[in-house]
Amino acid sequence: MTLTPFMTFSNYVLAACLAVALLVVTFNPLWRALRSYLVAKYCCVDEIKNLGTQRPDGAKIRGTAVVCGGSYAGLFTARTLHDHFERVILIEPEEWLLGKDARRVHSWEQESKRSRVIQYMSLQGTQPLLLNALRFMFPGWDTTCKESGIEIAPSSFKFMYWGKSPVEPKTHFGGSLPNTMYASRRGLETALRRRVLDPKAYPNIVQIAGSVTGFIVDPRFPDKVAGVKYASRDPESGTPTREILAELVVDCTGPAKGGLSWLPHAGFLEPVKMDTYDAKMRYTTFTFHVTPELAARLPVPGGFYREGGGFVTNHPDSRVDNKYIGILRNEGDLLYVCAGGWGRSGQSPKTIEDVIAHCQSLKLEKPFPQWALDMLYVLQEVEQDAVVSHVNVGPSFLMKFHECNGLPTNFVALGDAVCRVNPLYGQGCAKAVIGATCLNTVLNRTRSSPTLSHSFGHNFFKLQAMKLQPLWNLPILIDYGQQSTIPVEGEKKSSTDFARWYLRQIQKLSFTDESAYLPMYLAANLLGSTPIDMFHPLLVAKVMWQCIVGEAAS
């Protein structure tokens, strides 16, 4: 029997329909599988669930773990190592951090401040990932936050792009955004230190005052370090330079990157490669203690004490503007007003009048909220009581320890000792907890062994490098859009032009479509974003349609 042309066409249509149906049926499972693989590779949303699980005493690694540096990274690391080692020693240069002032319940009553942390009194935001990690690390962490005045509320910093607000993806999360902590650097670090150095909960952690000056080496074990030398700051110590034998040494010295000077002096001569770029970022933070009387005068929609501390955060269109503004309420009814931007021409804001002028000069597609300007005028009346912090941000860098084959097997580094990113994106604390989580993951692989494996350091640096990629790449994408940014040697800022153009289209969509904002929200909040999220076919189709409609309208 010969098929008629109509029947042949019908078969083609049927085949096409079956192909489309098959594609629809198979695409979603394949997409989900690929996405799950990428989340596991680049994110820590699952690994943090293993934090806080202690080895039985008999299975702990024999000997001492030494943590060099007692800021965020050092504190997270000490808490993590407590679950795996018989003893943990935290060496911190600032002596006052040994006392009660450093562990106050109400951090805003602190009499001292960090001399080695330039952002101690600057604006800070946190992500849900950090809150979730702390809940696994510390039983009753929410109670610690409550007694410290730290609010736990949905993560909404009221982001605006060029003056326009995206639709928050509440539907994706069942109607309410994931919770985060509204805590300053001082507030969160003080609460964290109070928990980590609690001798009843974590008796194997000891903090001492001193500065690590180098490694101890043992010729019998040339692939390891035997411990550390440190300059004691204890006035009653008869020996200014002392030694501690250690099974593991962790560099948490921050941007000082102490390990880079200790390694060659101990005979580990292979240089560690570094990528670095300079966004020329600077900003000024004004901190106000808001009394109930002042709060009643501040025209915040929903009131100053509304749920969540995010008030205003505006990011510029880098093609036409280089200025940033953020207003945030944190613990103790402290209000933070942060104004700054990219480039070093001109002066940073020094007064609230300067901040008002800064806001009025923003290049926006929708006017800056009048209520926010009115609030600044009220704050101008009390600015003599504000604490002012000016920060000129140094270059961002990424140390490539994972590419180095000549490192001690029992040495690792994390936090700002490995990677520093533009603090505008608020990832510093999360970066430290990600490093501690990687440390926990690698230690758990040999949970029943009382010694470290010969590949321990290499395995850690390899894992951490993967987890840091999103935190390094996203700031580069945004910072490279600014004219003043000096790129990584050998890179061209123009290489990110298309990605930034596409991101801008997604941002435009997000003003009316919450599914378009979801990938950006996941990335900003470290909730398991992947490189493919913004390239879902449905989202790509929406971008193309938006461009076609926009072109036709023009």
Image: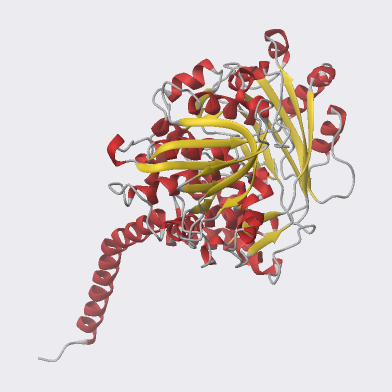
- Residue 527 % position (x, y): 45, 44
- Residue 194 % position (x, y): 53, 23
Q: Nearer the viewer, residue 326 or 513?
A: 326
Residue occupying image coordinates x 68% and y 70%: 491
Taking 15 as reference, is 228 left or right? Answer: right
If the image is split into quadrants, where does the C terminus sit?
bottom right
- Residue 252 % position (x, y): 58, 44
In the rendered image, the residue lying farthest to the top is 293
Q: Is residue 71 visible?
A: no
Q: Nearer the viewer, residue 462 or 198?
A: 198
Residue occupying image coordinates x 58% and y 63%: 268
Quarter assignment of residue 56: top left
Asked if 265 appears above or below 76 in the picture, the reply is: below
- Residue 512 % position (x, y): 54, 44
Q: Nearer the viewer, residue 158 or 68?
A: 68
Residue occupying image coordinates x 66% and y 25%: 236
Please name the colour scheme applied to the rendered image.
Answer: secondary structure
Q: Nearer the viewer, residue 472 or 446?
A: 446
Taking 140 as reference, is 487 left or right? Answer: right
Q: Is residue 75 visible?
A: yes
In the rendered image, the residue lying farthest to the left is 1
Taking 384 as reference, is 2 left or right? Answer: left
If the image is split into quadrants, where does the N terminus sit?
bottom left
Quarter assignment of residue 318: bottom right
In the rendered image, the residue lying farthest to the right is 346
Asked if 236 appears above or below 553 in the picture, the reply is: above
Residue occupying image coordinates x 58% and y 31%: 208
